[in-house]
Amino acid sequence: MPENPHAEHLKELLEGLNEPQREAVTHGEGPLLILAGAGSGKTRVLTHRIAFLIYTDQAQAGEILAITFTNKAASEMRERVERLLGRGTRGMWVMTFHAACARILRAEAQRLGYTRQFTIYDQADSRRLAKRSADAVGVDPKRFTPAAVHNQISAAKNRLIDAETYRQQVGSQFEEMIADVYAIYERDLHRMNAMDFDDLLFRTVNLLELFEEVRERYTNAFRHVLVDEYQDTNHAQYRLLQLLVGGGRPPQRGAAEPGDRPTYSGPVGHRNLAVVGDDSQSVYSFRGADIRNILDFQEDFPDARVVKLEQNYRSTETILRAANAVIANNRGGIAKRLWSELGQGDQIQLRALDDEYAEARFVVGEIQRLLDDGASRAEIAVLYRTNALSRALEETLTRADMAYQVIGGTKFFERAEIKDAIAYLSLIANPADVVSFTRVVNSPRRGIGQTSLGRVLASADALGVPVWEAAARPDRVPGLGAAAIKALGRFMDTMDELRRLAGMPAVGALAADGGAPGDGERGDDDPADAERGVPVGDLLEAVLSQTGYTEALEAERTIESQGRIENLEQLVEGARTFDAQAPEGQDTLAAYLQEVALVADADSRSDEGLVTLMTLHNAKGLEYPTVFIAGCEDGVFPHSRAIDEGGLEEERRLFYVGVTRAMSKLYLTYARRRAVFGAATYGMRSRFLDEIPSDLLEEHEQIAFRPGASWSSGGAAPTVTARRGSSPGSWGEPSRAGRAAVRDVEGAVSLASQFRLGEDVVHAAFGDGVVTGVEPGGVIVVRFAEDGSERKLMAEYAPVSRR
């Protein structure tokens, strides 16, 4: 038998791979599941396997389909394969799911009644069409926004539910309305020879199901199919792969019944499917990802070879032990244990801070210390559960003149909803602010279009009056239609009320009794002549409520809109903090707007080497020498929605993702008190922190005095500090402040001990409940009757009492 001409290349290809990596790369025919733990070199394995298949003549370049989730990942994979092969990969299909489907559909579109020149609608185009379809059936856009409608249609398509099937499954008035809109939306898409992004998957599945000869052609064309990040696939992507390679579950339309796993008797196919993924990093269920796809791979392919990549090349053993311990609390995952040869490393730093500003000051101070010790800003990342948590961090970084960037999102004061809210305040403070007026007059949508807006601005210019004055008399604006006059009148009535709430005098001629525009004391607006207005935080809350801004976001019913609401809540809390610190007699609205403007200006400056801020979802796939995870409190992380809706295991996987981003230093912080929904809430440390073995932590927290505790005092809030995981030293007598702190803590413990297991209690916000646990540190655990949720409460602070 002749020697393989690529023998030398093969030898080089396999050098440097550990044994499990080599096993995955050299696997022959049949299904292959590569369980790639964080930092275990999965991309290296995937690209080396592609090169191995070509060098061993198991497949030509054009016979390989390698699928990723992002264009960036596809580009990186293609470049690495080209370096391994020493030549181009032009004939190879290395691309995203959507790109692969679009290429197939371009060739086969006529079979589905489209031309090859069909248009692909992006998100904005799709939402515009959804709005038009909703208008056709008389949907109230204030009650059901285009975003909410399109989100429901998109979710249905990703479950491979067409409009007719959706109508058969409706169970509510909302779903009946969606069914009507969905049918019109689909009809119009087809008439326009267009597909939305979801159609690229949906129609490709239709194509392969309806035309056996097409399915066989593509099955034969792709002798090997490889998929990255398999844990993030949804039902449509699963079905597409099944049709291409054979095997797997039977086709389903909609949600399957629990435990419904009948044997599949469809296309056989070659079953050369190699998937790479990690069930412990499945964190995108809100996008439709189905973790069952990876958990049930061995049921779908009973003869599948399973290779576990457990050696981590990124993190220290301490960090990996913590990650392993936390994720072990999830049920139903595939067992694996990350390990490293990089040494034990430093203990994980755990800090309890008084509030979100103390937390931010600690994080920024520690970053500065690391920089002084020679670290680079580019080596440091601060992660958090939701974008709203970045506000205090961004403000503190800006005041410290420390350059930073926000990855996968927009800096806090540059987000659209934040700029809208600030524009409302700016217009209230300055009625001549045309830029702010233009931004908010139709946000949320009020039916005031660009033509009507242009006429208002032209009228203000012609009369030489502030835009507020011209808009306040819409009936006198030339060319303005009746609907626009009515909408503008309602808007200005609201703005007048908000200006009075702010303690501002009436604008120009409006201060006089019916005078013509141009009369009166335009533009004087002397704050000294005005009544004292409400604090900025209260004014901002009124703005968001009375203008309908929050209501419009709630109507969208999307994860994104919920995030925007949380951002606005954080803006309100920041304004309340400003109010509390503002000097007596100061024009707080003007001072607040000035501070915000200065912060936004500082945000626009750039510098080489930036501290990175991002949500934990955006951190997936990245790594940094030093990582901070802020906001580790129950209700924040894990998020309250996840606790209430049964999503705790995904939250734990998200925590695992965060921990495994760190290479050598990891900081975990939480605040005892955090401003939420207009009030200070006293949170419990995240349950995930208690799942980390204590010997891995250097912990500083407020606890009752015990042997081995150190005492510190200073300022108005003395604390008791204990270090877990460190050797107790020689402790002296506690100071007076320390003894006072102990009495406070012991008081909390004593108060908690008054509650008994099984005792009925009532909470001011959550209603009736029963005590299910009493824990050290003054903590009681209560299960609430209304939603069945179980919450940990500080007995000293929580508004809870016996029934």
Image (tube, grey):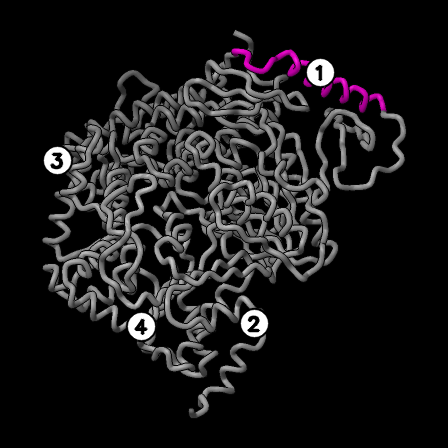
| Amino acid type for the residue under numbered disc 2 | Leu
Q: Is residue 744 magenta?
A: yes
| Amino acid type for the residue under numbered disc 3 | Val
Looking at marks 2 and 1 on the same chain, the residue that comes earlier in the sequence is marked by 2
CB contact under 8 Å: marks 3 and 2: no
Question: Do we see residue 279 in this rendering?
Answer: yes
Q: Is residue 797 magenta?
A: no
Alpha carbons under labels 4 and 1: distance apart = 70 Å
Q: Is residue 101 left or right of residue 299?
A: left
Looking at marks 3 and 1 on the same chain, the residue that comes earlier in the sequence is marked by 3
Q: Position of residue 772 (x, y in %)?
A: 55, 20
Tell which tag, 3 or 1, sits nearer the viewer. Answer: 1
Instruction: Give the main secondary structure of the magenta stretch.
Output: helix
* Residue at 37 percent of width and 78 percent of height: 58
Alpha carbons under labels 4 and 3: distance apart = 47 Å
Tell which tag, 2 or 1, sits nearer the viewer. Answer: 2
Pointer 4 residue: 223
CB contact under 8 Å: marks 2 and 4: no
Question: How many other residues sit within 10 Å of disc 3, few (<14), some (14-19) or many (≥20)?
Answer: few
CB contact under 8 Å: marks 2 and 1: no
Tell which tag, 3 or 2, sits nearer the viewer. Answer: 2
Pointer 2 residue: 17
Pointer 3 residue: 137
Q: Could you tell me which quadrant the N terminus lies in? A: bottom left
Q: Is residue 547 above or below residue 302?
A: above
Give the magenta-colored segment's residue range. Answer: 735-760
Observer-nearest of 759 and 66: 759
Pointer 1 residue: 747
**Of helix, strand and loop, which one carries label 1?**
helix
Looking at marks 2 and 4 on the same chain, the residue that comes earlier in the sequence is marked by 2
